[in-house]
């Protein structure tokens, strides 16, 4: 069965180096057998983003989420430790808590009333005296934690494969790019407001492709570009985007380039006024002091879109966002987005600038997201013709000098996808 899916995956990618052509089968966005294989070989084996540390500011805070179809509780226990428990009752399987978020020292199941501490420890079982005396042995009826749960720079990930490599090893070269985002904060980055959730009638892999696709920005988002060209008058960087896309290994990739818009850290535009200039100069001076001139310039003036395989995107562009998407069906995904910002910006004008940037472009009602969703859904609808017109093209830049608008990140993603489905990688 798995071997058979591997053969499917192998046939889904066609590379013709001699003619500089890299093609992906459109059936890979619609085939239920490949979708099932992805759930097994990718989503049950890779590290998947759950949430940010700052979403659980206090002991006993909890959030419920669905990760790769499994209900989980992401929580800070009474002693302050962050945990991730499967939200399934050890008795007969009801969701132990049905709230989206809250604060609770105990969870008690609605079905028959079994109760648990927020460490997962069972503390009460209905009519315990009617069970065998050994039934209540310590640990025998506790809520089950996810097999692996680790964090990097405040980002918590789970893995459903108990034998997976460590998160640090899995992230590998992508860690440098997570660092360059998280280091922008003096203290630490934190989530601003709550998670934003929306969905798209499109296969999840299209958002992985779209998130590191710089080629579409000019054509798909002209309204926004007109706005930033007006807002950035006098500082606009015209012509080709200066930068490149980089294969980070394990399916991770990044596009790093010179930003042509205002960045809260720390690229000033006239629209923001003279007062903001002083504030941004001070932020830049702090970055130079902490990291040296070269790295400070890279942090301030460059933008980056990072894909951590399979489904976490960190956009460090005109604001910073975390984005993850769940593979609900071949033609449907559920998307979660968080704005993150340095904790020290709270209540300052810098935060207002950042959130305006976020809302204008990246938010679900911004200038970009509805355009992107429409493009992705348009592809999904057109894939109904994939038997007659079977191939998507991802050749841009193949064998050429690196360019920020290459389709290299998409090729990196698909090659990792194929390796996973063919079980070629141990990590
Ligand atoms: S299913 Fe939870 S107490 Fe029975
Ligand atoms: Fe876009």
Image: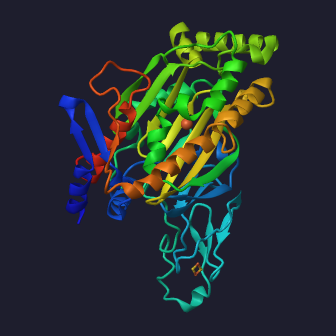
- Relative to 40, is 12 above or below? above
Residue furthest out toward the bottom:
130
- Relative to 330, is 183 above or below? above
Q: Left of 422 or right of it: where is 335?
A: right
Q: Residue at x 71, y 12 (%)?
A: 282
Residue 195: image location, x then y, percent: 66, 48
Query: In the rendered image, is residue 423 in sight?
Result: no
Q: Residue at x 53, y 79 (%)?
A: 91
Q: Left of 211 or right of it: where is 103?
A: right
Of 76 and 257, nearer the camera is 257
Q: Residue at x 67, y 23 (%)?
A: 228
**Quick check: which quadrant has ligand 2?**
top right
Residue 332: image location, x then y, percent: 50, 58
Of 29 and 184, nearer the camera is 29
Q: Left of 425 or right of it: where is 85?
A: right
Query: In the rendered image, is residue 72 in sight?
Result: yes
Residue 175: image location, x then y, percent: 44, 31
Q: Considering the image in quadrants, where does the C terminus appear?
A: top left
Q: Residue at x 40, y 37 (%)?
A: 171
């Amino acid at each position: 069965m798995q071997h058979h899916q591997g053969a499917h995956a192998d046939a889904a990618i066609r590379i013709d180096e001699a003619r500089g052509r890299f093609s992906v089968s459109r059936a890979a966005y619609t085939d239920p057998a490949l979708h099932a294989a992805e759930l097994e070989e990718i989503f049950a084996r890779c590290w998947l983003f759950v949430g940010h540390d700052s979403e659980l500011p206090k002991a006993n805070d909890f959030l419920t989420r669905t990760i790769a179809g499994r209900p989980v509780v992401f929580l800070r226990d009474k002693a302050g430790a962050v945990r991730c428990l499967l939200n399934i009752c050890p008795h007969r399987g009801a969701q132990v808590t049905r709230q989206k978020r809250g604060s609770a020292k105990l969870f008690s199941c609605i079905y028959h009333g079994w109760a648990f501490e927020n460490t997962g420890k069972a503390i009460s079982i209905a009519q315990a005296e009617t069970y065998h005396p050994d039934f209540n042995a310590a640990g025998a009826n506790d809520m089950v934690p996810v097999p692996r749960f680790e964090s990097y720079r405040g980002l918590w990930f789970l893995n459903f494969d108990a034998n997976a490599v460590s998160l640090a090893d899995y992230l590998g070269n992508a860690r440098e790019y997570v660092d360059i985002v998280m280091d922008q904060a003096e203290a630490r980055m934190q989530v601003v407001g709550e998670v934003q959730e929306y969905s798209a009638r499109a296969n999840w892999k299209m958002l992985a492709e779209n998130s590191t696709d710089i080629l579409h920005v000019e054509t798909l988002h002209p309204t926004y570009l007109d706005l930033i060209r007006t807002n950035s008058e006098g500082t606009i960087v015209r012509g080709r985007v200066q930068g490149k896309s980089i294969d980070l290994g394990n399916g991770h990739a990044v596009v790093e380039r010179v930003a042509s818009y205002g960045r809260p850290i720390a690229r000033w535009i006239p629209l923001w006024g003279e007062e903001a200039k002083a504030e941004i100069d001070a932020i830049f001076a702090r970055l130079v002091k902490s990291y040296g001139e070269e790295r400070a310039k890279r942090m301030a003036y460059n933008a980056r879109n990072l894909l951590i395989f399979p489904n976490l995107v960190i956009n460090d562009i005109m604001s910073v966002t975390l984005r993850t998407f769940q593979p609900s069906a071949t033609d449907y995904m559920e998307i979660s987005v968080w704005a993150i910002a340095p904790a020290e910006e709270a209540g300052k004008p810098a935060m207002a600038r950042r959130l305006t940037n976020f809302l204008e472009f990246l938010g679900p009602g911004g200038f970009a997201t509805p355009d992107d969703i429409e493009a992705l859904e348009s592809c999904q609808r057109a894939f109904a013709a994939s038997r007659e017109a079977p191939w998507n093209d991802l050749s841009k830049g193949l064998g050429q000098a690196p360019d920020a608008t290459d389709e290299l990140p998409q090729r990196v993603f698909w090659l990792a996808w194929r390796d996973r489905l063919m079980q070629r990688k141990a990590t």
